[in-house]
Structure formats: C-alpha cells, structure tokens
Image: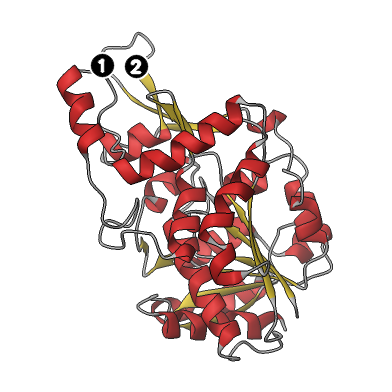
Amino acid sequence: MRKLTVLSGGHGGARFIAGLWHGIANGVLPGVCDDAEITVVANTADDLWIHGLKVCPDLDTVMYTLGGGLDHARGWGRTEETWSIAAELVEYGVPQTWFGLGDRDVATHLVRTQMLEAGYPLSEVTAALARRWLEPRYGDRLRLLPMSDDRVETHVAITSTESPSGLEVVHFQEYWVRLRAEVPAEQLIFVGLEDARPAPGVAEAISGADLIVVPPSNPVVSVGTILGVPGMRELVRAATAPVVGVSPIIGGHHVRGMAEQMLAAIGVQASALDVGRHYGARSAGGVLDGWLVDAADAAAVPELERAGLAAAAAPLWMSSAETTAAMAATAIGLVR
C-alpha cells in the first residue's frame, strides 16, 4: 500500500496522522511501503469568519501539528504565541472576543483571507499555506486538502428562554469555545452542506487510495460533515481500497472535544459499539470495512463483527508517536 487517504478532523485526527507518518518512517505498518504518501481530507464545516478573517480550525490544526508549530499544551493555535491583537480587540469592546486569535495565528488567517478575496479557492489557498508548513518536512508525500471549496458551517441549536421558539442557534465555534459545550445541543444545522462539492483532488484521493483511514475524530461534526458532502459517502463506498476506522470513544466517553454532546444531538449513544454501527459496514451500505476499539471496549468486538465489520480491541491512547503508530498498525492489520 502506497497511497493512504485520511478523512480527518482537528486535534485527534492530526495526532493520529503524525503517528501514521511515524509508522511509515519506521516500517511498522503492515503492508505499507516505506515511501508511502498520505493525503489528508480535512473537515471545513468548523470554519468561520471572525473579525473579518477566514479561520479554518481543523485545516490549521492539522497543518500546525504536522508542521511542528502547534501549541500542544492548549491543543490548538501556535507555539510561542502572543496575544497583543486579542487584548486590543477587548479594549475596543468589539464582539466575539471569546474566540482567541493569537498574533502569530492571525498571520495565517490574513494570508488566507487575502487569497480568498483575490479569488483563489480554498484548496489552492491551503496548498499555498502548506508549502510553508508541510513541504519542508514531507516534500510531496503529505498533501492537505479541504473537504470542499464551498462555504459550509455547522450551527448548533440550544435551549433559550429569551427566544419565542425556545431555541437559539449559535455557530459551532461559539458552542465549543464560548459555551464550552456545557449546554445540550438540541439540533445540528449544517449550513451549505447540501450544496457543497468535494474540493479538487478529493475524489481522486479516495478513488485512487490503497487504504482509507477514518481516525479518532468527531464522528458527527468532523468525519460526519466530510461524509455529508454530496457524493463523498458514495466515493468511499465505491473505493477499491479497504476502509478502516479508529474509535474516538473509549469506555463510553470521548477522549477530547465534544463527541458525546454531538452524538446525543443525533440520537446515537456514545459508545465504541454504537459509533461503529453508526458508520456502518460497507457490506451493509455503510462506509467501513474495519473498526478498531480500545481494550476497555473489547466486549463490543463480537457485536461489531456481527454487524459486518472486522473488529479488534487495542490500547487507543495516543500518548506518543510510537503508541499511535502501533495503534495504526493494528487497525491496518484488520483490513490488510
């Protein structure tokens, strides 16, 4: 296997991809060539315009993580960051200062915004940004693509006593950052998703892959929105490559983020078993051939197998590049 395609969200997906690359470099992935290439198709439904800037959180998290510029203590944004611009915005009393933009991070968003306003599509802008972050480390062997060039945004309906309808709709980032996902998500609204199309190169990355991987990203608002782009699910189902996924749920809880809240919003229980069944086996109209769960969820393996998935249990905590590479190796072994 030489061409690997990963459908990724932000932090969890980025850490998994780093481990996947470590596994390639050290020859520990079964059946994967030592000159293998990775194409990352990243979620863009978390994107927002704020303070006049286009911000793409998942694209940037993948780019910064793999390029060595992510602040791992926070899990987002740049290393050695300063906050002068954010402080000045507070002094001016502008709204939306709950979304923190560091000074170094602002430079990325300025470049992206200027290119978009000049008429370049997001895929070309992403390629230009990646030339700084990814090309020096990976050459042409790691490519980052947005799921779509079209504008897609996730919004969350929450209970509101001040609204006549009893609901208030906020952008996903406001739900996550300002509200800290501490209130129930009553409904998810994916604005623009039904009219979006896969970005250039995405269809080829899926149809031409030797292996497709669904990392431990949010199954609803990361991988779910990638698969929600019209035609994307069909591309994955029709691919000749095997498709393997890794559970983001361990022992009934997400490791990081808000998968539990998002799963509740669509009526899916937060368990490795139920998320695997939510994706479904390709043999039964779903998108997966294999599903790796944590050792804590080993009891789910027989039921997953009955659902048509090759399944196994292994430690899924991504504590280092080595442990993540081992996890990836076990997942690949399920569908090799």
Secondary element under disc 1, as helix, strand or loop, is loop
Hey, which quadrant is residue 121 in on the image? Answer: top right
| Percent position of residue 200, x then y | 76, 45
Q: Which residue is mark 1?
A: 161
Quadrant in which the C terminus appears = bottom right
| Crowd tier of the residue under label 1, counting other residues whose Cα lies within 10 Å: few below 14, some 14–19, many 20 or above | few
- Please, is residue 47 above or below residue 210 in the view? above
Secondary element under disc 2, as helix, strand or loop, is loop
Going by the image, does 9 lie left or right of 198?
A: left
Q: Nearer the viewer, residue 279 or 127?
A: 127
Q: Nearer the viewer, residue 30 or 76?
A: 76
Going by the image, does 127 lie left or right of 294?
A: right
| Percent position of residue 180, x then y | 27, 41
Q: Nearer the viewer, residue 189 or 14?
A: 14
- Please, is residue 250 above or below residue 186 in the view? below
Going by the image, does 13 lie left or right of 70?
A: right
Residue pictured at 55% horizontal, 84% vertical: 23
| Percent position of residue 226, x then y | 63, 47
Colouring used for the render: secondary structure
Counting the numbered discs, the total is 2
Residue pictured at 61% horizontal, 41% vertical: 125
Q: Amino acid at mark 2?
A: Gly
Q: Kindly check if marks 2 and 1 are in contact, taking CB atoms under 8 A apart as contact.
A: yes
| Crowd tier of the residue under label 2, counting other residues whose Cα lies within 10 Å: few below 14, some 14–19, many 20 or above | few
Q: In the rendered structure, which disc, 2 or 1, sits on the residue that comes first in sequence?
A: 1
- Please, is residue 290 above or below residue 168 in the view? below
- Please, is residue 296 above or below residue 188 in the view? below
Most extreme residue toward the left is 91
Residue pictured at 56% horizontal, 76% vertical: 21
Quadrant in which the N terminus appears = bottom right
Q: Amino acid at mark 1?
A: Thr
Q: Which residue is mark 2?
A: 166
